[in-house]
Amino acid sequence: MEAGTYQSWLSAVAVLLTCIAFVPYILSIFHGRTRPHVFSWVIWGMNTSVAFLATLHAGGGLFGAGVIGFSAGVTVFIAVLAYLKRADVSVTTSDRLFFIMALAAMPLWHWADDPLWAVWLITVIELLGFGPTFRKTWAQPFSESMGFLVLLVVRNALVIAVLDRHTTVTVLFPAAMAAACLALIAVMAWRRPQVVPVTPGH
């Protein structure tokens, strides 16, 4: 199988996994089973859009960068949905701190002449976005979908596989996201046996 055909197939699988992951996740928000933290999703929506542009500019290729671009669009939609639904209204001082730090660091990537520094910055910002969700999930381990996170880990592994060039610039962001999702899964697996699940609406 030619490299281009191989990449196109893996890219299609990655997009399919994104749909498989996000469609039930979005529906679960409407049904009140999942309560995403709006701060996290606003950060992720803006930052994934930047990651798409940076990966494309760094030579990641249409197949690899395109999956990130598709995810950026879906993430922005969920950020808007989380705001409209007020899915998680508990906002702590630490949440605000993570949010402020992420927003403050956001413009810095534009002035980073080195693509590597730009990707490091957007990766750090993305990880800061996990802060409010980690805090929420520790307190409410049933408020996120473990299956959704597993699919995101697999999707990010496929993104890495279809990149035209495997360098720190192109690999760092999807690899960091996969690692963060795995850490969140570990938190949920640890906390769920300790917490009684809350029925939506109670």
Image (spheres, rainbow, N blue to C red):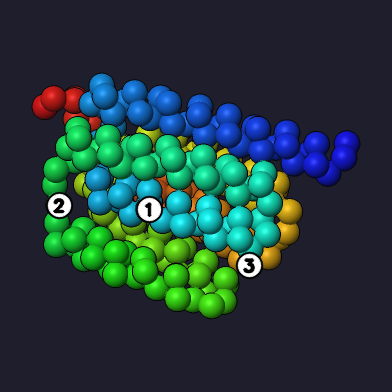
Foreground of the two, 111 or 105: 111
Foreground of the two, 63 or 19: 63
Q: Horizontal placement of 104 versus 185: left or right?
A: left
* Residue type highlighted by circle 3: Thr
Helix, strand or loop under label 2 = loop
Would you say residue 194 is visible in this rendering? no
Q: Is 147 situated above or below 42?
A: above
Mark 3: few/some/many CA within 10 Å (<14, 14-19, 20+): few
Percent x, y of residue 159: 62, 46
Q: Is 136 situated above or below 176?
A: above
Percent x, y of residue 195: 23, 39
Mark 2: few/some/many CA within 10 Å (<14, 14-19, 20+): some
Mark 1: few/some/many CA within 10 Å (<14, 14-19, 20+): many
Q: Is 169 situated above or below 74?
A: below
Callout 3–callout 1 Cβ contact below 8 Å:
no
Q: Of tags 3 and 1, which is closer to the observer?
A: 1
Q: Horizontal placement of 33 versus 179: left or right?
A: left
Q: Of tags 1 and 2, which is closer to the observer?
A: 1
Instruction: Name the residue located 40 percent from the left edge and 25 percent from the top edge.
Output: 24
* Residue type highlighted by circle 1: Met
Percent x, y of residue 18: 52, 34
Percent x, y of residue 68: 54, 46
Q: CA distance from mark 1 to mark 2?
A: 20 Å
Q: CA distance from mark 3 to mark 2?
A: 34 Å
Nearer-N-terminus badge (1/2): 1
In this figure, which residue is indicated by the disc labeled 1?
46
In this figure, which residue is indicated by the disc labeled 3?
168
Q: Is 54 situated above or below 70?
A: below
Which mark is on residue 91?
2
